[in-house]
Image (cartoon, rainbow, N blue to C red):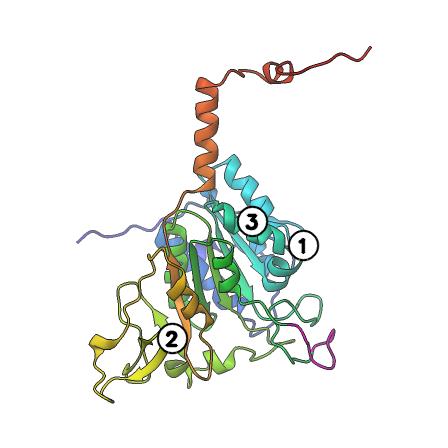
Amino acid sequence: METLQCLYKPKEYASDQEVKWCPGCGDYAIINAVQRAFSELNLKKEDTAIISGIGCSSRFPYYMDTFGFHTIHGRPAVIASGVKLANPELSVWIVSGDGDSLAIGGNHFIHLVRRNINVNLLLFNNEIYGLTKGQHSPTTKQGVHTKSAPFGTIENPFNVGELVLGSQGQFYARVPDTDVKLMASVFIEAEKHKGTSVVEILQNCVIFNDDTHASITAKENKANTQLILEHGKPMLFGENNNKGLRLNGLDLQVVTIGENGITEQDILIHDAHSKSTVLHNMLIQMKLPDFPVAMGVIRNVESSVYDEEFHRQITEGKKEGKYKTVDDLFFSGNTFEVN
């Protein structure tokens, strides 16, 4: 049996900086999962860059012993795109929150996904602005009372997965911050995917929106409230793994094996590689109390990658194009002189 020699142990990816997240913050579990994933991926520190925007999550680069850039609000997707295009050999990770990526950075987010640049985006979704003390964000549930919505927010929240698929996203996964093992395995799948990988992390802000995901993530509930998807495996869940999903006409239906003649053969098999978004959208939209919430890699489809096409075009242009220098370009076509 081949023995995998890891370059670094997970803790060796940690920097010497003091971590300044609130005690109990979900970010601690996430950074542990990232370090575990980096170790299993054998990522060299000098070949890895972590780019963040603004928010509690965006302190991430300080706490990792890799290259990193703490950028401005809503712009990590732009900076990361430039980093990847300038050095395609780098493993580039974007760390951002729901306010950072889906409000001020919303336009950059959808175009990053549409272009399919080969980077990984970890989107910490705690449904609140934590760093700026509790304003509602684009993912805050309708009716939730916040400092900026004292009578309850009246906005319809974004569903992150729908936004990714609507932007032609080819990789989308959802994970809870309470499951380090699942997070690490999904981060590894995200890195292996060629193109933009978006991983939505249901993260808990203990100060301004504590337990917002508890109905899904609480230990005593999770067997019945989470459906952990694996490509090629039946969509089963429940304390005895005896509940599952099947199609009833054009709708998903929760069924119990052993009731009304239902067997495991009736349960849908997860196909993360299907180019069709129909079933992936249906999985993304599932919510309590009628359905479990889908976790794991929901969509993972190969498609053309922007940075590869970008560098192919440059290589071909240098070889076959009529412009060999910048002067060739400036003095070509229609030019005129100003006297």
The residue that label 1 is drawn on is 73
Q: Residue at x 67, y 51 (%)?
A: 72
**Residue 250 at x, y = what percent?**
37, 72
Against 281, residue 215 (above or below) is below
Q: Amino acid at mark 3?
A: His
**Residue 120 at x, y = what percent?**
47, 52
**Residue 176 at x, y = what percent?**
46, 71
Where, quadrant-wise, is the N terminus in this rendering? bottom left
Against 254, residue 136 (above or below) is above
Mark 1: give few (<14), some (14-19) or many (20+) Cα within 10 Å: some
The numbered disc on residue 42 is none
Q: Nearer the viewer, residue 23 or 312?
A: 312
Predominant SS of the magenta segment: loop
The residue that label 2 is drawn on is 251
Image depth: mark 2 or mark 3 in front: 2
Q: Residue at x 44, y 59 (%)?
A: 172
Secondary structure beneath label 2: strand
Q: Amino acid at mark 1?
A: His
Q: Residue at x 63, y 70 (%)?
A: 128
**Residue 70 at x, y = what percent?**
62, 51
Q: Amino acid at mark 2?
A: Asp
Against 268, residue 76 (above or below) is above
Q: CA distance from mark 1 to mark 3?
A: 16 Å
- The mark nearer the N terminus, 1 or 3, is 1
Image depth: mark 2 or mark 1 in front: 2
Reply yes or no: does residue 149 show up in magenta: yes
The residue that label 3 is drawn on is 111
Q: Nearer the viewer, residue 228 or 323?
A: 323
- The mark nearer the N terminus, 2 or 1, is 1
- The mark nearer the N terminus, 2 or 3, is 3
Quarter-of-image position of residue 257? bottom left
Q: CA distance from mark 2 to mark 3?
A: 31 Å
